[in-house]
Amino acid sequence: METRADTTPPPIQLIDTEADILAELAVGVEDRLPQVSDLLLREIERATIHSREAMPSNVVTMHSVVEFIDEASGAGRSVELVYPKDADISAGRISILTPIGAGLIGLCEGQSILWPDREGCQRALKVTKVTQQSRGG
């Protein structure tokens, strides 16, 4: 059932305030992390933007916990998507400024995306579950 259309990135959704912060982050690391900066800016550009209140709960946003599988290997992971200062891979918190972080933002449950890993190889990532964290203070 796979077709060439599978190489077209799926539609994504971002929260308006997060999109602004992410754009600033991406521009700020342009010299140091050009690949991630470019990927993230392209994702922001093609996203449908919502207010936080209008964002569906099954969409990957900052600080959500996302379960996904690498469709090639079948390996599953559960991570929290965070800003760089909060990243701690051993605690399952991955930075938005990683290829996987930039690839997952804005996807909803059931969507897949072809995305480059750190070595530049294309990986198919599929979101299987999104859990929103309560954001107190």
Image (cartoon, rainbow, N blue to C red):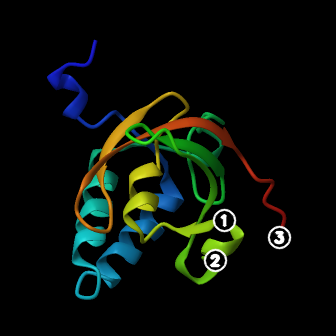
Q: Is residue 52 above or below residue 20?
A: above
Asked which secondary structure carries label 1, the reply is: loop
Spatial CA distance of label 2 from label 1 is 6 Å
Residue under label 3, please give it: 137
Asked which secondary structure carries label 2, the reply is: loop
Q: Residue furthest top?
A: 1
Write the residue at 61% across / 33% down: 56
**Few, some or many C-alpha atoms within 10 Å of disc 3 (few <14, some 14-19, many ≥20)?**
few
Q: Are marks 2 and 1 in contact (CB under 8 Å)?
A: yes
Q: Is residue 124 above or below residue 3?
A: below
Residue 134: x and y in percent read 81, 54
Write the residue at 66% across / 74% down: 90
Discs 3/1, front: 1
Q: Quadrant of residue 70?
A: top left
Question: Residue 92, labelled with which disc?
Answer: 1
User: Which one is nearer the viewer's eye here, 134 or 91?
Assistant: 91
Q: Is residue 22 above or below residue 66?
A: below
Q: Quadrant of residue 59?
A: top right
Residue 9: x and y in percent read 27, 37
Residue 44: x and y in percent read 34, 54
Write the residue at 40% across / 34% down: 112
Q: What amino acid is found at the position of numbered circle 1 in the picture?
A: Gly
Spatial CA distance of label 3 from label 2 is 21 Å
